[in-house]
């Protein structure tokens, strides 16, 4: 039976930005610092984490043997060696830690093969968080097979909820590529939209500082309406769009330019690239 999030011993394999964001979310939920450890090769990152009162090490195996959960947060290019190192160190354990992988693009079958090099592979969850997790407003997609128990799923959901306002389990691993296309890459789509709103306003005479404040707050306000309103996005759009008014003129311009098709093509391009990167990792 998996422990509760409050009681679980959690070790991070890698201490970069996303790991630091999750750690921050856990500490904000009053998870004891004594229950969190980090292995991180870079002195700068390791020292920052040590300054937070966490146990840190340059060794991937020092804390992982005692962990209930190991969060794999390393670069994809070093993941194979790290997984094999950990798997060999856990080879004699009756029950290895639950592994939560946030390593982008690495499929479950590869993770199982690498971790299983020293024995049986541990239970593994793949998750795709996005960068708004850095401010506690993330959206995460998750996938696991039958080797992960209900208790372990609940523990994973609770852990990712520390930085994600939406944690969505998908029924097939390939759907994580769709999650990447929507929420993983999605923040950049909105940043680009705001970037162009500012550019248009400035070209028509509004000072850049004012344009930036207005555009960014509009994006924030609209986002809050989306998550707090019971109405669907389509209805919220209609509520703002008076017949033959200014918004109607803008919406008609979007339609004429093929916005719906452009968004669909953009998401499909991101999904396709995610699939390609996953396959490249499998072939390497």
Image (spheres, rainbow, N blue to C red):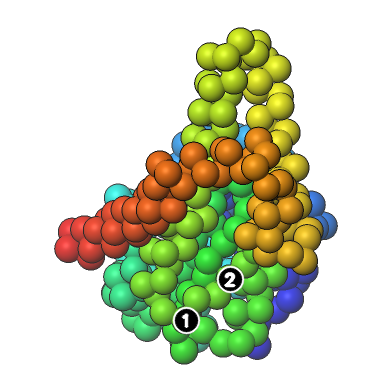
218 to 90, vertically: above or below: above
Report x, y in % for residue 145.
44, 84
- The structure residue drawn at horizontal position 65% and vertical position 23%, both measured from the top left corner, is 212
Q: Nearer the viewer, residue 246 or 77?
A: 246
93 to 67, vertically: above or below: below
243 to 4, vertically: above or below: above
The quarter of the rendered structure image containing the N terminus is bottom right
What is the secondary structure assignment of the residue under circle 1?
Answer: loop
- Give the numbered dot on residue 171: 1
Report x, y in % for residue 278.
29, 61
Q: Which residue is mark 2?
A: 168
Residue 33 in sight here? no
Mark 2 neighbour class, 10 Å CA radius: few under 14, some 14 to 19, many 20 or more: some
The quarter of the rendered structure image containing the C terminus is bottom left
Q: Quadrant of residue 89?
A: bottom left
Numbered circles on residues, count: 2
Report x, y in % for residue 186.
50, 49
- The structure residue drawn at horizontal position 62% and vertical position 50%, both measured from the top left corner, is 133
- The structure residue drawn at horizontal position 78% and vertical position 60%, both measured from the top left corner, is 229
Q: Nearer the viewer, residue 126 or 253?
A: 253
Mark 1 neighbour class, 10 Å CA radius: few under 14, some 14 to 19, many 20 or more: few
The Cα atoms of the two marked residues, 1 and 2, are separated by: 10 Å
Report x, y in % for residue 279.
23, 63
């Amino acid at each position: 039976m998996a422990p509760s999030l409050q009681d679980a011993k959690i070790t991070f394999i890698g201490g970069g930005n996303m790991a630091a964001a999750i750690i921050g979310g856990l500490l904000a939920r009053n998870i004891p610092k004594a229950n969190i450890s980090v292995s991180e090769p870079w002195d700068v990152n390791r020292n920052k984490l040590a300054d937070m009162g966490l146990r840190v090490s340059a060794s991937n195996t020092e804390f992982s043997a005692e962990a209930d959960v190991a969060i794999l947060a390393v670069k994809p290019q070093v993941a194979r060696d790290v997984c094999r190192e950990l798997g060999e160190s856990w080879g004699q354990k009756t029950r290895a830690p639950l592994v939560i992988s946030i390593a982008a693009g690495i499929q479950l079958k590869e993770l199982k093969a690498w971790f299983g090099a020293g024995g049986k592979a541990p239970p593994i969850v793949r998750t795709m968080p996005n960068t708004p997790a850095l401010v506690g407003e993330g959206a995460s997609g998750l996938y696991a097979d039958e080797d992960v128990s209900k208790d372990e799923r609940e523990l994973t959901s609770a852990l990712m909820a520390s930085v994600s306002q939406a944690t969505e389990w998908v029924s097939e691993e390939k759907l994580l590529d769709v999650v990447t296309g929507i929420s993983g890459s999605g923040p950049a789509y909105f940043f680009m939209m705001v970037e162009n709103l500012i550019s248009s306003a400035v070209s028509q005479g509004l000072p850049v500082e004012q344009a930036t404040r207005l555009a960014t707050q509009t994006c924030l306000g609209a986002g809050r309406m989306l998550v707090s309103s019971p109405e669907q996005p389509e209805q919220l759009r209609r509520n703002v769009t008076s017949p033959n008014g200014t918004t109607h003129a803008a919406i008609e311009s979007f339609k004429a330019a093929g916005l719906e098709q452009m968004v669909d093509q953009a998401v499909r391009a991101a999904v396709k690239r995610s699939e390609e990167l996953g396959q490249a990792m499998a072939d390497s």
